[in-house]
Image: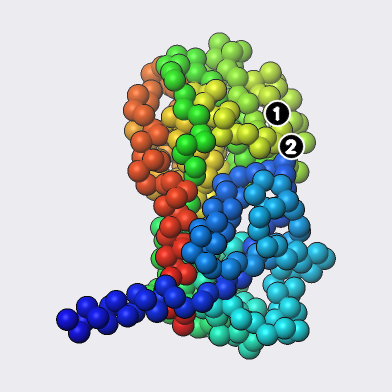
Amino acid sequence: MEPVRALLLLYHNIMTEPKKIAVLCNYELLSERVGGMDYFFWQFDSKCKTNDIQVDWFFPNQSDHGEYVALTIFDSGHQSVENYFLSLCKTKKSEYTHIITHFIELCTPFFYKIKQFSAAKIITIDHNPRPLRGYPLKKRIEKRIKGILFSRYIAVFVGVSDYTKSEIIRDFGSVVKKKTLTIYNGVIIEDILQRTNRNIIHPSFLTASHLRESKGIQDLIDAVALLPDEIKKAVKIDLYGEGPYKSVLVAKMKHHNVTHCFTFMGSSPHLKTLFSNYDYMLQPTHMECFSLSILESLAADVPVITTNVGGNEEVVVSGENGYIYKAKDVLALKDILEAVYLGQKKIETNTRTLIEECFSLTTMVDHHFALVLQNKS
């Protein structure tokens, strides 16, 4: 019975030890852009409160849209979130048991500085995609040195895909391997409308991404320009998103005389209800970590045509719930588009099932919360 008593005592200590968490997010709060991470923050905060765990949130700005009104938010204003948090720790005693970071660079002097003021367990979540051909040699060396110097101050590294987990270890060396794990992003399945039927011939398409070069929409324009004239006259692709690359994309469309094939739809906070209006989502991205828009599209039973970067192949299986092609391979994308548009290639399975089973937001929140239940180190 002694081992049983010891386990019960350990569980009691874990559940009764008062916990106070600081979550640092280099993530601007925008009412016109409400995405999967916003819902994650809201649900994680709610789960912590339900379990009598206090959470202080540190963002670049203050906002009360959605459920942010219920969060305890400290905004960094004109400072970086990291510097603001450090200055706060210097002026008042830190009582945090856990410090969690999102969208903040890993293995920097910041983590060493935290430990001068706090004994909290530090958990870092890596959402950052890597360049298609990797970092330059100088940056790879710098990251390896930072891993040696500063990884010791971080208790747990979390990648949002197995790809990200591998890249963390590649960046910072084997010293972080034993404390690096994967927690997949998730989406609210119930809020995503499901398509009731899919057009096998002449399907409709959308893209959903920030308009910047790394998202590869210029490749999509080039691919459409190569389609046979009869398809080019009829195919329609709606582009959701805003960004600095829009003028370049417009110029490329005009150059190829395919402007009529595309419609800029702007940003929408209601994409979850819009995916179901389409037959396929196109994501020609050059770099990705683990795409929430892919999960949301598949949850709407809308297959995805995307590239072999980041964690895309961990959720999209070519020929089953979408199609995968090599990033920047315009000819391959053109061939897929042509075959899908003519009905020569078709996805007949319900793509929602996999998301329901493996990539729900509830599962994501539970796995992140489980890290908080562990004893601090």
Task: Answer above or below: position of 271 versus 125.
Answer: above
Residue at 70% over, 62% down: 73
Task: Answer above or below: position of 100 versus 208.
Answer: below
Q: CA distance from mark 1 to mark 2?
A: 9 Å
Q: Which residue is mark 1?
A: 264
Mark 2: few, some, or many residues within 10 Å (few <14, many ≥20)? some
Disc 1, SS: strand
Task: Answer above or below: position of 166 versus 216.
Answer: below
Estimate the x, y position of residue 295 in percent, counting from the top left.
47, 41
**Contact check, label 1 and label 2, Cβ < 8 Å:** yes
Q: Nearer the viewer, residue 212 or 281?
A: 281
Mark 1: few, some, or many residues within 10 Å (few <14, many ≥20)? some
Residue at 47% over, 36% down: 190
Indicate the amino acid at tag 1. Answer: Phe
Looking at this rendering, what residue extends furthest in the left direction? 1
Q: Nearer the viewer, residue 46 or 229?
A: 46
Q: Is residue 302 left or right of residue 80?
A: left
Indicate the amino acid at tag 2. Answer: Lys
Q: Which mark is residue 299?
A: none
Estimate the x, y position of residue 179 in percent, counting from the top left.
41, 74
Residue at 70% over, 36% down: 267
Task: Answer above or below: position of 161 versus 347.
Answer: below
Q: Is residue 122 left or right of residue 116?
A: left
Q: Which residue is mark 2?
A: 246
Disc 2, SS: helix
Residue at 57% over, 73% down: 20
Please identify, in this view, whether the residue under mark 1 or under mark 2 is nearer the observer: 1
Q: Nearer the viewer, residue 227 or 353?
A: 353
Estimate the x, y position of residue 357 in percent, counting from the top left.
35, 43
- Can the viewer see residue 305? no
